[in-house]
Each structure stands twice: as C-alpha cells, then as structure tokens.
Amino acid sequence: MAVELDETLFPDIHEVLMAYLAPIAETDTEPPHEDGIGIQINRVGGASDGISDYPRVQITCHHPDPRGASLLARKVANRMENIAGEAIEVEDEPKPICIDSCRVDTPPEAEPYENPDARREVAFYALSLQKPWRR
C-alpha cells in the first residue's frame, strides 16, 4: 500500500488575520511603533489533526486612549464574530482562505501595559480552518 504525502501547508493564521483585520487598523505580529494605534496578532496555541488547523490566537488592540482601545477591540470582536465563511484574500496564497469557525475564548479586556502612554485590550479566539484544496 502506497501512501501519498500531503505537502499542502495550512495557511499562516497571522497572515490571514492581518489581511482580514486590516480595514480596521494597522495589523502586525508586533506592537505598533509610531502613534501607538494598531492590532497585534499572535498565535498562542492550538492543534492540528492533519485535516483542520485549530489555532488559538491572542489579538491585542493598542491605542493611546482607554476609550480608543476599547472601541478598537469591540470593532475587532465584531469582525471576528463574522469571520466564518468569509473568503479572505492573502498575499502568496493561490486562492482565498476560508475560516470554518471562530469561538471567543476570552472577550476583550483591558490589560496593564508597560508603556504608561498607551492602553491595550486583549482577547483570545479559537479558530478552525482547513488546508487549501489542491487542484
């Protein structure tokens, strides 16, 4: 019996979410540098069964003002609640990426930050997505 090795890679969840959340604010895997406004995306766990990837992500909204941080976090939460089934265009991916499901593990909440001139709201989401279909 011969088994064919599937070398198709799961999409990089950082790239997928940075593209999806870009209409709200600047996105990156690092905190914003200049004006302190931005969305930081980091995978912080999850698993894969070879068919689906189940990333757990931390999304941190940075803003100099507490109200601004809260507003940004709520906009992100609203967008994340509607991510399932969306076709997300990601650079270097041959076709749009589709997230199968998104669950809120921890809703946005204010978190202390080492920079006294900035605020941040942190939320955790559990997602599921499949490998892109080969053609």
Image (cartoon, grey):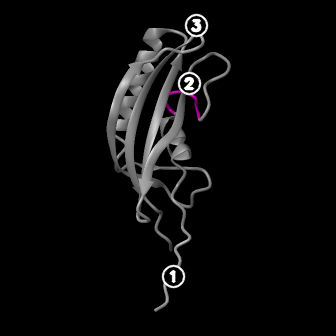
Asked if the residue under mark 1 is in contact with the one under mark 3, i.e. CB atoms within 8 Å, the reply is no
Instruction: State which region is magenta.
Output: 23-28
The residue identified by callout 1 is: 4
> Which residue sits at x=43%, y=53%?
47
Instruction: Give the mark, 2 or 1, whose residue is nearer the N terminus.
Output: 1
Left or right position of 21 against 114 = left
The residue identified by callout 2 is: 38
> Which residue sits at x=52%, y=35%?
41
Q: Secondary structure at mark 1?
A: loop
**Amino acid found under the numbered disc labelled 2:** Gly
Residue 100 percent location from the top left of the image: 35, 53
**Amino acid found under the numbered disc labelled 1:** Glu
Residue in front for this viewpoint, 75 or 5: 5
Residue 26 percent location from the top left of the image: 58, 29
The residue identified by callout 3 is: 116
Tell me if residue 94 is in the magenta stretch.
no
Q: CA distance from mark 2 to mark 1?
A: 43 Å
Choose mark 2 or mark 1, whichever is in front.
1
Instruction: Give the mark, 3 or 1, whose residue is nearer the N terminus.
Output: 1
Q: CA distance from mark 3 to mark 1?
A: 55 Å
**Amino acid found under the numbered disc labelled 3:** Pro
> Which residue sits at x=44%, y=25%?
122
Circle on res. 53: none
Left or right position of 106 against 42 = left
